Structures are given as C-alpha cells and as structure tokens.
Image (tube, helix red, strand yellow):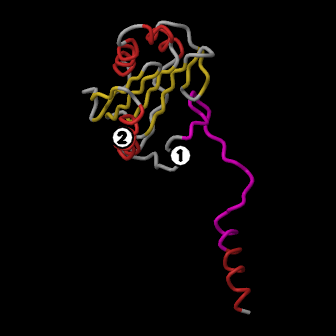
C-alpha cells in the first residue's frame, strides 16, 4: 500500500499544476513577439516591465551606416553583419549585470564604463562589440558583430555602439 501512495500523490500534483499540457502559450503580437527575455517576471510595477525593441530597421541602418533587414525579435542583419538588442526589465537587468560584466571582461579585448544610465559598459574586440545599459527604461544589451566597415576603422565599433546607446530610451 505504501508503494502506491507516492505515485498517486505525484500524479495528483502533476494534474493540478497542469504539467504535461501540450498546448504552448502564444505571445502577444509585436516587434519582439517570441522573445524569451523576462517571461517569468511580473509586468505590474516600476522596474519590472520589459521595454519593447527600441529600434526599427531604418533607425539602425542610419546609425550603423548600412542597410539591415529586420530579422524579428529585435535582431537586424544583412546576411553577415548582425545587430541584436535584448531588452529586460530594470530588475532583471540589475540581477544579471555583474555576471554579464564579468563575462565581457573574459571575452572582449577592452571593457570600459559607459557613464550612461545607472550602470553600463562597452566591450569591444576586433569583430564584435557589446554594450549593456541599465537605466530608468529598463535593461538593454546591444551586440554588433561582423561589420567589416567598422572593424576596418580604429574605434569603429566603439563609435557606432556609443551612437546606439545614446539612442536608447531613458
């Protein structure tokens, strides 16, 4: 009898919690529908709302100086070059900032404080750059990679990344 109690309790718990439901939830339509950032965080208070994608394809093309197509989920590219923006609530950005900064120190050739928002850094290496900004509007991680024109210029990635950071909502 005791051997049957645990399986019965587990089956009841699974049935009550809805585990095993094969119907996925559908995100609301929008420019960043399907984004997996902050899915488990509440959306009802200061600092807990994940901002929408801050750019359009036209805006990023103007800033980076070349045509980029909107690939969805705040990702823009031309088949080689790629610009992505990951948004998070301010709370989520705060929770992951130190880890992201530590990883950037290990991955990029130079990492410097941006002096923008409450927290922010700019990380650059030969073919890639990353900027993370935590401000009143939320958390933003912007990544540029494989832009031949930017890699060929001294500080090309850093200059364009600073323009992108300046265009983020505050």
Quadrant for residue 3, please give it: bottom right
The answer to whether residue 16 is left or right of residue 122 is right
**Residue, disc 1:** 39
Is residue 117 located in the magenta-colored stretch of the structure?
A: no
Q: Which mark is residue 129?
A: none
Query: Which SS type dominates the magenta stretch?
Result: loop
**Residue, disc 2:** 102
Residue depicted at 52% across the width and 11% down the height: 58
Q: Position of residue 105 (x, y in %)?
A: 35, 35
Residue depicted at 64% across the width and 65% down the height: 17
Q: Position of residue 111 (x, y in %)?
A: 32, 29
Give neighbour class at mark 2: few <14, some 14-19, many 20+ (Cα, 10 Å): few
From this view, report whether residue 60 is shown above or below residue 123.
above
Residue depicted at 38% across the width and 44% down the height: 99
Split into 4 quadrants, where in the image is the C terminus?
top left
Range of the magenta residues? 13-36
Is residue 22 located in the magenta-colored stretch of the structure?
A: yes
The answer to whether residue 132 is left or right of residue 42 is left
Total number of numbered labels? 2
- Element type at mark 1: loop
Q: Position of residue 4 (x, y in %)?
A: 73, 86
Residue depicted at 49% across the width and 44% down the height: 38
The residue at the far bottom in this view is: 1
Q: Position of residue 140 (x, y in %)?
A: 41, 32
Split into 4 quadrants, where in the image is the N terminus?
bottom right
């Amino acid at each position: 009898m005791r051997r049957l109690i645990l399986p019965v309790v587990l089956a009841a718990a699974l049935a009550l919690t809805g585990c095993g439901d094969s119907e996925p939830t559908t995100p609301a339509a929008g420019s960043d529908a399907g984004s997996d950032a902050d899915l488990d965080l509440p959306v009802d208070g200061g600092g807990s709302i994940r901002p929408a994608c801050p750019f359009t394809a036209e805006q990023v093309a103007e800033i980076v100086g070349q045509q980029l197509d909107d690939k969805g989920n705040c990702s823009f590219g031309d088949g080689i070059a790629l610009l992505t923006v990951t948004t998070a609530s301010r709370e989520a950005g705060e929770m992951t900032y130190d880890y992201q900064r530590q990883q950037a120190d290990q991955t990029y050739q130079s990492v410097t404080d941006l002096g923008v928002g409450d927290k922010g850094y700019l990380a650059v290496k030969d073919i890639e750059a990353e900027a993370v900004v935590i401000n009143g509007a939320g958390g933003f991680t912007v990544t540029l990679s494989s832009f031949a024109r930017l890699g060929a210029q001294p500080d090309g990635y850093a200059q364009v990344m600073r323009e992108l950071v300046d265009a983020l909502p505050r």
